Image (cartoon, rainbow, N blue to C red):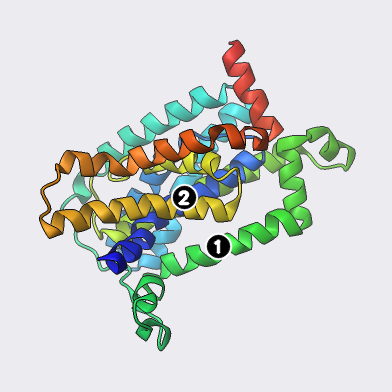
């Protein structure tokens, strides 16, 4: 049972983890995107539809990322070009994504696809317990595991990471170096939307092999919360996403075991866990907020 929960934590948590890594990039540059939920839905539908049309799940994953990027481009234009409130723009984008995917996805509800299936890694997958938990997943899950250390390295060990973090902390430093912080933020928001779109595509093309209206069920909102829980650190965000995935896997395992626990309680358990984690770490993480985001929240409170 424990092995099933741990395995399910990775499979169910991958979509949230990808979206949280994308949101982390955006917030490190000083732009919060509450529309991550909409980007994930766009990616889930775009990835599923492309897989239906082409029969190629890799093209589906790419299309999902591009759909998420396209939706995040709207947010970037509103916030960076028109000076719109980031929180209001993100919420609008989320509801827009929910509505447009529900409308465009009606004809795909009954479609069948051959998506990504678990691909056991030879030898490693034969290790008792650990092999099933870590080395028997779909390709997107493997790639997401590699993404986290790569993103950490870029953020904290490269010039690109310094530029990205400076855009969210002290933009005048970038101006002094001849770098336009607006362009950096544009790139960060688009990258965040792309990863959120791939996260949505993983949900439809690899995890469920289906499309259902509003299938993300709040995962994009959870991804934004996980970035705060993680204090804007990639590995901590990954841990938070997998904790959410473990709660999802637990509810499925408990239902399969037929234990006398209300299914409504099980459905809300992952979200209660997320809220509890945020309450526990809120005070300790407050000082870690990028300065650019602090100004956003302060302006919203003053307004």
Exactly how many numbered labels are in the figure?
2
As displayed, is residue 176 above or below residue 5? above
For the C terminus, the image quarter is top right
Q: Secondary structure at mark 1?
A: helix
Query: Is 12 situated left or right of 229 in this image?
Result: left
Q: Secondary structure at mark 2?
A: helix
As displayed, is residue 247 above or below residue 85? below
User: Where does label 2 land, which residue?
Assistant: 240
Q: Please give the name of the residue rendered at 41% of the width and 72% of the height, measured from the top-left corner.
A: 134
Position in image of residue 159 (x %, y %): 79, 55
Position in image of residue 125 (x %, y %): 38, 82
Which is more toward the observer, 46 or 16? 16
Query: Is 69 situated left or right of 294 in this image?
Result: left
User: Where does label 1 land, which residue?
Assistant: 147
Quarter of the view holding residue 171: top right
Position in image of residue 6 (x %, y %): 35, 64
For the N terminus, the image quarter is bottom left
Q: Please give the name of the residue rendered at 75% of the width and 59% of the height, measured from the top-left corner.
A: 157
Position in image of residue 35 (x %, y %): 46, 35
Graded by Cα atoms within 10 Å as few (under 14), some (14 to 19) or many (20 or more), the crowding at tag 1 reads some
Asked if one can make out residue 221 in the rendered structure from this viewpoint, the answer is no
Which is more toward the observer, 71 or 32? 32
Disc 2 or disc 1, which is closer to the eye? 2
- Assess whether mark 1 and mark 2 are in contact (beta carbons under 8 angstroms): no
Quarter of the view holding residue 126: bottom left
Asked if one can make out residue 270 in the rendered structure from this viewpoint, the answer is yes
Q: CA distance from mark 2 to mark 1?
A: 15 Å
């Amino acid at each position: 049972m424990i092995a099933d929960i741990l395995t399910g934590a990775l499979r169910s948590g991958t979509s949230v983890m990808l979206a949280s890594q994308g949101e982390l990039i955006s917030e490190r540059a000083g732009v919060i995107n509450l529309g991550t939920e909409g980007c994930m839905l766009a990616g889930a539908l775009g990835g599923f539809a492309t897989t239906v049309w082409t029969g190629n799940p890799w093209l589906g994953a790419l299309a999902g990322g591009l759909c998420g990027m396209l939706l995040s481009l709207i947010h970037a234009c509103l916030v960076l070009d028109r000076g719109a409130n980031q929180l209001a723009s993100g919420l609008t984008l989320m509801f827009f994504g929910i509505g447009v995917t529900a409308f465009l996805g009606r004809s795909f509800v009954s479609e069948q696809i051959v998506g990504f299936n678990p691909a056991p890694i030879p030898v490693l997958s034969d290790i008792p317990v650990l092999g099933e938990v870590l080395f028997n997943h779909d390709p997107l899950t493997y790639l997401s595991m590699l993404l986290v250390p790569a993103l950490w390295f870029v953020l904290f060990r490269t010039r690109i990471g310094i530029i990205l973090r400076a855009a969210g902390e002290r933009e005048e430093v970038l101006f002094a170096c001849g770098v336009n912080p607006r362009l950096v933020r544009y790139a960060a928001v688009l990258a965040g939307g792309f990863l959120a779109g791939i996260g949505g595509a993983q949900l439809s093309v690899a995890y469920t092999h289906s499309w259902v209206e509003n299938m993300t069920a709040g995962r994009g909102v959870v991804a934004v919360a996980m970035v705060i829980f993680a204090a804007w650190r990639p590995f901590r965000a990954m841990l938070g996403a997998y904790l959410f995935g473990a709660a999802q896997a637990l509810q499925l395992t408990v239902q399969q075991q037929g234990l006398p626990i209300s299914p409504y309680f099980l459905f809300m358990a992952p979200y209660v866990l997320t809220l509890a984690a945020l309450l526990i770490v809120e005070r300790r993480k407050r000082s870690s907020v990028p300065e650019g985001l602090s100004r956003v929240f302060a302006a919203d409170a003053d307004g």
